[in-house]
Each structure stands twice: as C-alpha cells, then as structure tokens.
Image (cartoon, grey):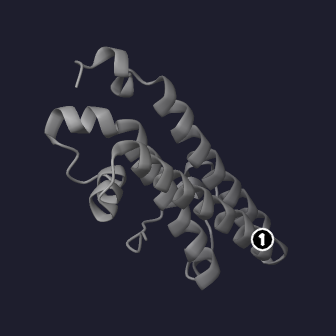
Amino acid sequence: MSRGWQNFLVDVGVGYELQHDLLVRPGFRELVDIAVDLVSWDNDLYSYRKETFDHGAMHNIVRALADRHQCGLDEAVRRYTALHDAWVERFLALEARLAPTLTPEGARFVDGMKDWIRGNIEFSAVSPRFREDLLPAP
C-alpha cells in the first residue's frame, strides 16, 4: 500500500550503510513497504479518537475502512485488525524467504524495522498524545 517509501535511516542511525543493490531488490523493497504501512496504520489506529476530535479523521485507515465498507467503528477496527494481521504475516513470510540471502547488515536492517514497528506500538500505547483519558468525550 505504501509505495513512496523512504530509507528511514535504520542503518545509518546505528553506524552502517546498506548497499544500494539490497535497497532496490524487489523483495527487500516490499519488506520495507510493509514495515512503513504497519507503522502508519498502527499510528492511525492509536490516533483515531484524537484525529476524530481534532478534524474528523479525514486521512485515517480506520475511517477509510468504515467509509469504504459502510460500517461502524467496531467493524472498521475488526477489518483493520484482519488487514494488519495479514500484513504482519506477509512481512514474516517475506523475511523468512529473504533471510538466507541477506548480508549481516541486511539482517540488522530487518531487525531494525521490526524494532521500529514494535517501538511505534509501545510508544503509542503510553504516549499522552494518544491517551483517551486526556481527550474530551466524543
């Protein structure tokens, strides 16, 4: 879904740089695209109520699913969860397929993407930015 990915400096941030041929390899690019999608989607899930309060959640995957399927919030979240879980399964399958071909730096980069995905969830779960108890009632 994310096709305009950028190198988010996982490698440079920890002191190495991936070779260009790996960054442009189709399977590896897809893995990065999936990671970017997951982080973006998780942010949408955690920020849904805040965005709805602030400006109607105009650009939010939960809202988009509700609109597309003409369903309520609970059903949209179920659809989001199914889509998210399918993307995680795809990421893990692709990672397993690529693992034997990765350099040590490539494997570190994949681990960094997994840390980024998980770290985003952990941050969002505790961040005051997304705490529902700090938002006015809908």
Determine the image quadrant of residue 3.
Answer: bottom left
Q: In this view, does 112 lie above or below 107?
A: above
**Residue 77: horizontal and vertical position, in percent?**
44, 47
**Residue 114: horizontal and vertical position, in percent?**
65, 51
Query: What residue is pinned by disc 1?
Result: 103
31 sits left or right of 125 in the view: right
> Which of the image's four quarters has the N terminus?
bottom left
Going 78% across and 71% down the picture, which residue do you hit? Answer: 103
Going 56% across and 75% down the picture, which residue do you hit? Answer: 30
Q: Nearer the viewer, residue 55 or 11?
A: 55
Determine the image quadrant of residue 129.
Answer: top left
Going 51% across and 40% down the picture, which residue do you hit? Answer: 120
Give the residue furthest to the top.
Answer: 133
Q: Is residue 109 above or below residue 138?
A: below
Going 35% across and 58% down the picture, which residue do you hit? Answer: 65
Is any part of residue 25 visible from this angle? no
116 sits left or right of 6 in the view: right
71 sits left or right of 20 in the view: left
- Callout 1, which amino acid? Thr
Give the residue furthest to the right.
Answer: 100
> Which of the image's four quarters has the C terminus?
top left
Q: Is residue 95 above or below residue 70?
A: below
**Residue 50: horizontal and vertical position, in percent?**
27, 32
Determine the image quadrant of residue 18.
Answer: bottom right
Q: Which of 95 and 109 is in front in this view?
A: 95
Give the residue furthest to the front.
Answer: 71
Q: Is mark 1 on a helix, strand or loop?
A: loop
Is any part of residue 75 visible from this angle? yes
**Residue 119: horizontal and vertical position, in percent?**
57, 38
Q: Which of 6 and 60 is in front in this view?
A: 60
